Image: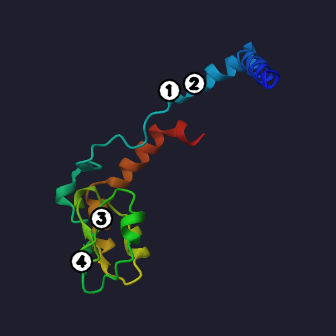
Amino acid sequence: MEDIISNLQFLSQKAMKMVRSKKTYKLYLEQKKKVKMIPILRKESKENWYGIPKHEIEWCPEIDYKKCIGCRLCVLECATHVFRFDFKRHVAEVIKSLKCKIGCTTCINLCLAKAIKLPPLPELYKLMKKGNIIDLCWEKLDYNKYMWI
């Protein structure tokens, strides 16, 4: 058993020496520098969406409790945790409406009973044209060109 442990220690030391070799270490430093140069893709605040305050945008899911069958897909799949499940009533509830990602329709697409509703997308498109959001997106992508290399 001691031989196995000593062999493992020897191999791990040998592996560490290989990692620390000049060539691999230089590559590591180059990669580290590149990572530092990459800016964050979405640096906006949680209260704003491309400069528009979120409370001014009507993008909040509404649940028709008569239709909800309690499958919990919306609760489990929502990336921003807008929903929670009420175990007493056996339905999903909206608890963090301002955290809902503008333009996301995942909950609607997954709802088996079609119990979730969001404002129509054309209203969002009008807001996007009004706020020049497409131009802002192009600027952010241009700024973050290192992210796509």
Residue 149, relative to residue 97: is it above or below? above
Which residue shows up at 82% across the image and 21% down it? 3
| Residue at the limit of the structure toward the bottom, as seen here | 66
Which residue shows up at 65% across the image and 23% down it? 28
Query: In which quadrant is the C terminus drawn?
Result: top right
Using the image, tell me which numbered label, if any, was put on residue 36. 1
The residue tagged 3 is 83
Helix, strand or loop at label 4? It is loop
Helix, strand or loop at label 1? It is helix
66 relative position to 148: left or right: left
Three-letter residue code for mark 4 = Arg
Task: Name the front one of labels 2 and 3.
Answer: 3
Q: Which class describes the residues within 10 Å of circle 3: few (<14), some (14-19), or many (20+)?
A: many
Q: Which class describes the residues within 10 Å of circle 1: few (<14), some (14-19), or many (20+)?
A: few
User: For this rendering, which residue is in front, 22 or 69?
Assistant: 69
Three-letter residue code for mark 3 = Phe
Helix, strand or loop at label 2? It is helix
User: For this rendering, which residue is in front, 50 or 22?
Assistant: 22
Mark closest to the chain's N terminus, 2 or 3: 2
The residue tagged 2 is 32
For residue 101, which quarter of the picture?
Answer: bottom left
The residue tagged 4 is 89
Three-letter residue code for mark 1 = Lys
Question: What is the spatial separation of the Cα atoms under label 4 and label 2, in whole angstroms?
Answer: 51 Å
Mark closest to the chain's N terminus, 3 or 4: 3
16 relative position to 37: left or right: right
Which residue shows up at 74% across the image and 17% down it? 13
Mark closest to the chain's N terminus, 1 or 4: 1
